[in-house]
Image (cartoon, rainbow, N blue to C red):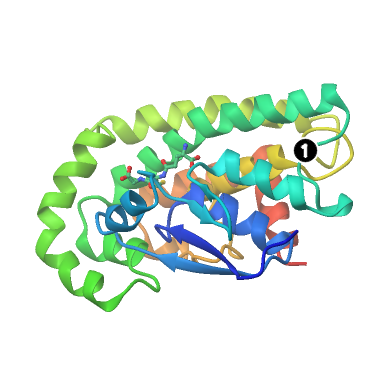
Amino acid sequence: MNQQKPFRLITIPVSHYCEKVRWALTRMKCNFIEEPHTPPFHTFVTAKLGGKTTPILVTDTEIFTDSTDILKYLDSIALNENKLYPHNPELRQKVEELEKLFNSRLGIATRRWGYSYINHNYKNVQRAWCKGVPSIEKILLPLIFPYMQKILRKRFNLTTESSQEAYVQIKIIFAKVSELLADGRTYLVGDNFSAADLTFAALAAPIIQPPEHPMKPRPLTEIPVKMASEIEEFRETLAGKFVLRLYRERNI
Ligand SMILES: N[C@@H](CCC(=O)N[C@@H](CS)C(=O)NCC(=O)O)C(=O)O
């Protein structure tokens, strides 16, 4: 790797797609600086870098604007023991299929589920969005909060039924993952940790709230009762236990 400067990682701190990349960089012991932003202020930075969403990874020579592209890039520079995609083409295909499924369905559903519960409450949104962001963004958030609530409702189609609809979607994917794990295997594909495991755990984290998560989740007693009981229910599944285990091992 010819990278001289630390990587720049542009994030919305609570974003689970950002956590996916943060985890990969941490695991590879890459030198990186996270630049967290509160929505919608992230757009000033993402637009300059040619992207719309976070995460964005800036290297000395390239800019990556999608979490899967970032993982593939990191894999290309990783030492053998840190590779996230298997050499074996069949196993690699399985990893890529699962990563795609988790990105396109699980991540969308856990985000919708989470916002359905916290969107009404300024304090909860502030807590989710403001960790480590520039002071000016923290100061401006209360002023634009009503506008951001509208945007969230529209973008994620938040309705009175949305938490339940998202819950059902999550349940379907958790059932599929629990079925894969039912034979006692350690990882979803092959014998090694891969992008499939990392993507599943990072994108499932909003509904599992692993205590080791860098966003430091609040105790279940401090969140809405129904939300807490759904978290407990998912934690009890094989897939949920798998996420809790991967998070316990995340920083080892
Ligand atoms: N496909 C993208 C999705 C990332 C994504 O949806 N990021 C959200 C945060 S969870 C975002 O930045 N949203 C801000 C926006 O849409 O303006 C990836 O995997 O990188």
Question: Tag 1: residue type?
Answer: Tyr
Q: Position of residue 98 (x, y in %)?
A: 66, 28
> Which secondary structure, mark 1?
loop
Question: Is 59 above or below relative to 93?
Answer: below
| Residue at the spot of label 1 | 85
Whether residue 136 is visible to the viewer of this picture, yes or no, is yes
Q: From the image, which quarter does the C terminus lie in?
A: bottom right
Image point (43%, 33%), residue name: 167
Q: Residue 241, relative to residue 141: is it above or below?
A: above
Q: Which residue lies furthest to the bottom in this view?
A: 135
Question: Relative to 115, is 202 on the left or the right?
Answer: right
Q: Is residue 236 visible?
A: no
Q: In this view, does 206 lie to the left or right of 180?
A: left
Where residue 181 sits, quadrant-wise, is top right
Q: Position of residue 52 (x, y in %)?
A: 35, 43
The picture quadrant for ligand 1 comes to top left
**Foreground of the two, 31 or 165:** 31
* Side of 167 where 75 appears, left or right: right
**Point 34% across, 36% down: residue:** 163
Residue at (62, 42) in percent of width and height: 199
